[in-house]
Image (cartoon, rainbow, N blue to C red):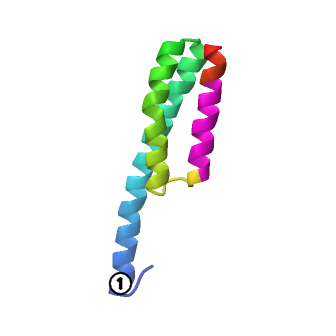
Amino acid sequence: MANTPSAKKAARKIERRTEVNKNRRSRMRTFVRKVEEALASGDKDAAGAAFKNAEPEIMRAAQKGVLPKNTASRKVSRLAQRLAKLSA
Protein backbone atom coordinates (compact mmCIF):
# COMPACT_ATOMS: atom_id res chain seq x y z
CA MET A 1 0.00 0.00 0.00
CA ALA A 2 1.22 3.50 -0.86
CA ASN A 3 2.40 5.52 2.12
CA THR A 4 3.65 8.84 0.82
CA PRO A 5 1.34 11.43 -0.74
CA SER A 6 3.14 11.19 -4.08
CA ALA A 7 2.79 7.40 -4.12
CA LYS A 8 -0.92 7.72 -3.32
CA LYS A 9 -1.36 10.19 -6.16
CA ALA A 10 0.56 7.89 -8.52
CA ALA A 11 -1.73 5.00 -7.55
CA ARG A 12 -4.79 7.14 -8.33
CA LYS A 13 -3.35 8.15 -11.69
CA ILE A 14 -2.52 4.56 -12.59
CA GLU A 15 -6.06 3.49 -11.69
CA ARG A 16 -7.57 6.16 -13.96
CA ARG A 17 -5.17 5.39 -16.80
CA THR A 18 -5.91 1.66 -16.52
CA GLU A 19 -9.62 2.35 -16.88
CA VAL A 20 -9.08 4.52 -19.97
CA ASN A 21 -6.79 1.94 -21.57
CA LYS A 22 -9.28 -0.83 -20.83
CA ASN A 23 -12.00 1.13 -22.64
CA ARG A 24 -9.72 1.83 -25.61
CA ARG A 25 -8.68 -1.82 -25.88
CA SER A 26 -12.29 -2.97 -25.68
CA ARG A 27 -13.36 -0.48 -28.35
CA MET A 28 -10.55 -1.62 -30.66
CA ARG A 29 -11.43 -5.29 -30.18
CA THR A 30 -15.07 -4.55 -30.99
CA PHE A 31 -14.10 -2.97 -34.30
CA VAL A 32 -11.79 -5.89 -35.14
CA ARG A 33 -14.53 -8.37 -34.26
CA LYS A 34 -16.94 -6.62 -36.65
CA VAL A 35 -14.42 -7.01 -39.47
CA GLU A 36 -13.86 -10.69 -38.65
CA GLU A 37 -17.59 -11.38 -38.52
CA ALA A 38 -18.09 -9.71 -41.90
CA LEU A 39 -15.18 -11.71 -43.35
CA ALA A 40 -16.62 -14.94 -41.94
CA SER A 41 -20.03 -14.22 -43.47
CA GLY A 42 -18.38 -13.58 -46.86
CA ASP A 43 -19.92 -10.12 -47.27
CA LYS A 44 -17.11 -8.13 -48.88
CA ASP A 45 -18.96 -4.80 -48.86
CA ALA A 46 -19.64 -5.02 -45.13
CA ALA A 47 -16.11 -6.30 -44.51
CA GLY A 48 -14.63 -3.39 -46.46
CA ALA A 49 -16.70 -0.85 -44.55
CA ALA A 50 -15.87 -2.49 -41.21
CA PHE A 51 -12.15 -2.57 -42.10
CA LYS A 52 -12.25 1.12 -43.02
CA ASN A 53 -13.60 1.86 -39.53
CA ALA A 54 -11.31 -0.59 -37.72
CA GLU A 55 -7.97 0.50 -39.16
CA PRO A 56 -7.88 4.02 -37.63
CA GLU A 57 -9.17 2.62 -34.35
CA ILE A 58 -6.32 0.09 -34.20
CA MET A 59 -3.71 2.70 -35.07
CA ARG A 60 -5.16 5.13 -32.52
CA ALA A 61 -4.83 2.44 -29.86
CA ALA A 62 -1.17 2.06 -30.83
CA GLN A 63 -0.64 5.80 -30.74
CA LYS A 64 -2.15 6.01 -27.27
CA GLY A 65 0.11 3.21 -26.02
CA VAL A 66 -2.56 0.54 -25.57
CA LEU A 67 -0.61 -1.84 -27.80
CA PRO A 68 2.77 -1.69 -29.57
CA LYS A 69 2.98 0.02 -32.95
CA ASN A 70 4.25 -3.08 -34.76
CA THR A 71 1.46 -5.18 -33.26
CA ALA A 72 -1.12 -2.72 -34.56
CA SER A 73 0.51 -2.68 -38.01
CA ARG A 74 0.53 -6.48 -38.07
CA LYS A 75 -3.16 -6.65 -37.13
CA VAL A 76 -4.09 -4.15 -39.84
CA SER A 77 -1.95 -5.95 -42.41
CA ARG A 78 -3.45 -9.35 -41.66
CA LEU A 79 -7.00 -8.02 -41.79
CA ALA A 80 -6.22 -6.32 -45.12
CA GLN A 81 -4.81 -9.56 -46.48
CA ARG A 82 -7.93 -11.48 -45.50
CA LEU A 83 -10.09 -8.76 -47.06
CA ALA A 84 -8.08 -8.91 -50.31
CA LYS A 85 -8.41 -12.69 -50.38
CA LEU A 86 -12.18 -12.38 -49.97
CA SER A 87 -12.41 -9.82 -52.78
CA ALA A 88 -10.35 -11.95 -55.17
Say whether residue 55 is left or right of residue 9.
right
* Depth order, front residue of 7/47: 47
Q: Is residue 59 above or below residue 85?
A: below
Q: Secondary structure at mark 1?
A: helix
For the point 39% across and 64% down, which residue is it?
15
Say whether residue 76 is left or right of residue 53.
right
Q: Quadrant of the N terminus?
A: bottom left
- Give the magenta range: 70-82
Say whether residue 49 is left or right of residue 5.
right
* Depth order, front residue of 88/51: 88
* Depth order, front residue of 3/68: 68
Say whether residue 18 is left or right of residue 83.
left
Whether the magenta-drawn stretch holds residue 18 is answered as no
Whether the magenta-drawn stretch holds residue 80 is answered as yes
For the point 42% across and 47% down, which residue is it?
24
Instruction: Classify mark 1: residues with Cα within 10 Å, few (<14), some (14-19) or many (20+).
Output: few
Task: Residue type at mark 1: give it.
Answer: Ser
Q: Main secondary structure of the magenta part?
A: helix
For the point 42% across and 81% down, which residue is it?
2
| The quarter of the displayed image where residue 39 is located | top right
| Residue bearing mark 1 | 6
Q: Position of residue 42 (x, y in %)?
A: 59, 12
Q: How many marks?
A: 1
